[in-house]
Image (cartoon, rainbow, N blue to C red):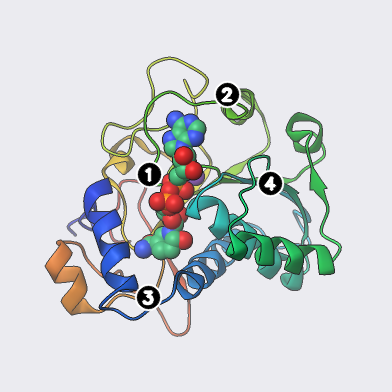
Amino acid sequence: MAALRTLGPKAAAALDEELMSTGAYSIDQLMELAGLAVSQAMFALSPPQKTPKILVACGPGNNGGDGLVAARHLYHFGYQPTMYFPKQTKNELYQRLRTQLEHLKVPFTDDFIGAAGKSDYIIDAIFGFSFSGEVREPFPAVIRALAEGEVPVLAVDAPSSWNIEDGPPKDGPGKGYNPHALVSMTAPKPLVKWFKGRHFVGGRFVSQEIAEKYGFDVPPYQGSDQVVEIGSHGERL
Ligand SMILES: NC(=O)C1=CN([C@@H]2O[C@H](COP(=O)(O)OP(=O)(O)OC[C@H]3O[C@@H](n4cnc5c(N)ncnc54)[C@H](O)[C@@H]3O)[C@@H](O)[C@H]2O)[C@H](O)CC1
Ligand SMILES: [K+]
């Protein structure tokens, strides 16, 4: 069976714009569905009885927002999430997502490496389709730990530090980073050509008509699932 078609970074950003203008969605709604999909992918990989302690690393953009939402759902599923969210903006949405977690007594840490050593799984919600250039502080040490660590990682939309079109970096902190699992948002990005792990697609909010306009496929979601597992490179299973 043919692989699901990929969505490049420019088209992914344009799709987001369209969903939030003529599509009449708010960013809160899209992020809620994206984060719920991340939490369902985590549950499909390993339930809270097996891997209770999840470290969620959040970057400064919407990829990080997906991580904040996912952590709240994971808490309600019975996991014990811990947050690493070093670059916080004054953006009101992110402050609300943080407050929601604080009300659940979900801890925030500045010590990624220390927390990683005590975790059963890590969610990489650092950078998504708007990542470019060299990894800037404070993230190089975090990316290096993801690349070298033994704790399995679920990456949100992209393994952070990978070029969205050209895949894994040949040097720098992300060299050798190939996470255990990936959940692509809306559609796989071109970088999946180099991905080797378990692969899910989520973000169940796009019509066939919109998918055709942007040249990607709506994956075969089953029942009320927010994610569907596909092959590493986007093959339909
Ligand atoms: N339609 C969907 O599927 C949706 C996906 N969502 C998620 O949103 C991200 C894309 O979010 P965006 O805010 O555009 O950008 P990122 O989070 O990828 O990153 C921007 C953020 O990172 C900083 N940055 C960029 N490059 C670097 C660097 N080299 N070093 C350090 N920092 C860097 C930049 O300054 C910004 O602050 C997508 O992947 C999905 O996960 C939405 O949640 C909902 C709709
Ligand atoms: K990521």
Closer to the N terminus: mark 3 or mark 4? Answer: 4
Residue 159: % across, % down = 46, 39
Labels 3 and 4 touching (C-beta < 8 A): no
**In the picture provided, is 199 more to the left or to the right than 118?**
left
Distance Cα–Cα, label 1 vs label 3: 26 Å
Residue 151: % across, % down = 68, 37
Distance Cα–Cα, label 3 vs label 4: 25 Å
Closer to the N terminus: mark 1 or mark 3? Answer: 1
Compared to 44, does 112 lie above or below? above
Closer to the N terminus: mark 4 or mark 1? Answer: 4
Q: Amino acid at mark 4?
A: Tyr
Distance Cα–Cα, label 2 vs label 1: 17 Å
Residue denoted by label 3: 221
Distance Cα–Cα, label 4 vs label 2: 20 Å
Q: Nearer the viewer, residue 47 or 60?
A: 60
Labels 1 and 3 touching (C-beta < 8 A): no
Residue 180: % across, % down = 53, 41
Residue occupying the point 49% across, 55% down: 62
Residue denoted by label 1: 130
Distance Cα–Cα, label 4 vs label 1: 24 Å
Question: Element under label 4?
Answer: strand
**In the picture provided, is 224 more to the left or to the right than 6?**
right
Closer to the N terminus: mark 2 or mark 1? Answer: 1
Residue occupying the point 62% across, 60% down: 94
Residue denoted by label 4: 121
Distance Cα–Cα, label 2 vs label 3: 36 Å
